[in-house]
Amino acid sequence: MGFLENHFFYFILMLLTIAYPLAQSFERRIYYYKKWRLLFPSILLMMLLFIPWDICFTHWSIWDFNSDYICGIKVFLLPIEEWIFFIVVPFSCVFIHEVLNYFFNKNLESSSYSKISFFLAIVLALLSVMYSDKLYTLVCFSLTSLSLFILSLYNPVWIGSFFRTFLVSLIPFLLINGFLTGSFTEQPIVRYSSNHIIGFRIINIPVEDSMYCLLMLLIVIATYEKKLNQN
């Protein structure tokens, strides 16, 4: 990957991530582009939480960005590529959500998924207490736990399709995050302080990032599905 390892690497990675979902947005079976007016407000709502979170953690040196792989333009401490990340990743994941809902049963039996959501909420709550000295672990697991607990209470009809989307989205998410965390490059784009994570990694990706992804998608898809039902 040496030929790609330059100041535009993060930006190129985001372009490659969105290329196929964007190109297929006009596909006649999905018509994803017609739902953008519902999707982008949902992404914006998620960003209202994740951007301040990202800024604070960057300021506190819980993570930082390798200047060798970013163009150098920053907005409130964050590389412009990081802002793009919060648009590109949910855009692509909701595209996966729409494709899965089209080709497979959309409304999966919800009671079992509600129980799974509640169980995960309990596990994450316990882990956040156990690792309360690890700030990324504490914040990520506690917020995700709370969100999953609320999800289990409401038990929406889309809860099963959400978990299906999350599991499928983990494949490209781990690939992208693998590049971000240095699994396939000489140096990581995003560097984590070992003082604030558990230390368990999946192909060099902190395990916290998987729950970070879950929380991000849950906020976007919950808002998106609500808007779809209201439309």
Image (cartoon, rainbow, N blue to C red):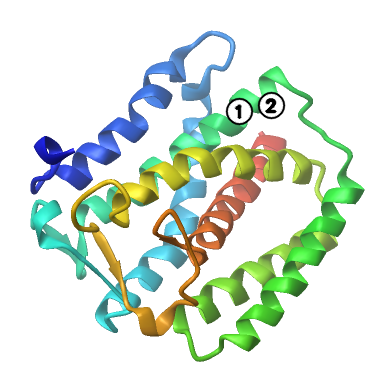
Horizontal side of 94 relative to 227 (left or right) equals left
Which of the two residues, 91 or 120, is positioned nearer the viewer here? 120
Q: Position of residue 45 (x, y in %)?
A: 49, 56
> Does dot 2 land on a helix, a strand or a loop?
helix
Q: Mark 2: which amino acid?
A: Asn
Relative to 175, residue 177 above or below:
below
Q: Which quadrant holds the C terminus?
A: top right
> Does dot 1 land on a helix, a strand or a loop?
helix
Horizontal side of 48 relative to 42 (left or right) equals left
Residue at the spot of label 1: 98
Which of the two residues, 90 or 190, is positioned nearer the viewer here? 190
Residue 183 visible in this rendered orientation of the protein: yes
Relative to 127, residue 2 above or below:
above
Question: Does the CB distance between marks 2 and 1 fall below 8 Å?
Answer: yes
Q: Residues within 10 Å of mark 1 (few under 14, many from 20)?
A: some
Relative to 183, residue 28 above or below:
above
Residue at the spot of label 2: 101
Residue 40 visible in this rendered orientation of the protein: no
The residue that appears at 23% across and 51% down in the rendered structure is: 81
Q: Position of residue 48 (x, y in %)?
A: 43, 63
Name the residue at the top extreme: 28
The residue that appears at 20% across and 70% down in the rendered structure is: 77
The residue that appears at 84% across and 55% down in the rendered structure is: 114
Q: Mark 1: which amino acid?
A: Glu
